[in-house]
Image: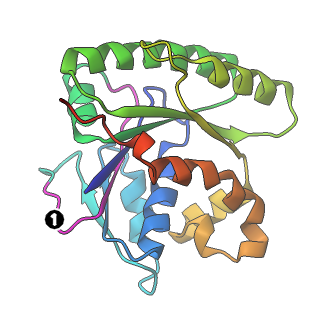
Amino acid sequence: MRSILLLNAKGGCGKTTMATTIAAYYALKGKKVVLADFDPQGSSMDWLAVRPVDRPRIQGLAAWQNQVRVPKTTDYLIIDSPAAVSGRPLANLVQRADSILIPVLPSPIDIRAAEHFIGQLNALRSVLNTQVKLATVANRVRENTLAAGELDGYLEMIKLPSGKKTPYLAMLRASQNYIRAAEMGLSIFEFSPARTQHDRESWTRVFRWLDSKRSLPTPKN
């Protein structure tokens, strides 16, 4: 089972949108997908509640209120985390994951918050002795703006404790397609390709990374 965690301590950065998009993408490929919502706001579960019954099934877990029991037949576990998570709850989430995607918004406040959080996360990984892989995604970006350029430059420069660059996978634009998809319990991959071509292309590197060995924990000797 592959487990993918959407994580950022700052709220409103688009974790739920990314979690539901990823869950639907793999469900469309015939995979058995579980979407675990650890956020008491329950936004991922609200999305599933309006998802059309004729669409590929995604099992939802309201993980903030129930014990998490993932079926053994699950191919992909997608984890939507709460904001302001830290300490033991953060450690528990990290220990569940193979791969962590960190969405970052294009504002100075969000960039500084992300820098601080990624530092905390790297320190936590060392304490937990976990080889979970991290990558960043610029999210809700208005293209060709100064803020977009500054975020792009920042994410290109983030490094892991080893000195290697943290993978920076994609710049996802602020698109009405995501808003419409959220309202309908769908993903951009369930709209017509012509209507969502630009947004689909933005996800190419994200899924290339998730489907590669580079996103998997390094085996321990």
Residue 86 in the image: above or below residue 72: above
Q: What residue do we see at 52% from left, 59% from top?
A: 21
* 93 relative position to 12: left or right: left
Residue 119 x, y percent position in the rendering: 43, 13
Residue 19 in the image: above or below residue 147: below
Q: Main secondary structure of the magenta part?
A: loop
Residue 140 x, y percent position in the rendering: 68, 41
Residue 191 x, y percent position in the rendering: 65, 74
Q: Which residue is mark 1?
A: 71
Neighbours of disc 1 within 10 Å: few (<14), some (14-19), many (20+) = few
Bounds of the magenta span? 69-85
Say how the picture is coloured: rainbow
**Mark 1 residue element:** loop
Residue 5 x, y percent position in the rendering: 37, 42
| In the image, farthest residue toward the front | 221
Quarter holding the N terminus is bottom left
Residue 62 in the image: above or below residue 186: above
- Front residue of 82/145: it is 145
* 73 relative position to 81: left or right: left
Q: What residue do we see at 37% from left, 17% from top?
A: 122
- Could you tell me the amino acid type at mark 1? Pro
Quarter-of-image position of residue 34:
bottom left
Count numbered badges in the picture.
Answer: 1
* 171 relative position to 7: left or right: right
Q: What residue do we see at 63% from left, 24% from top?
A: 155
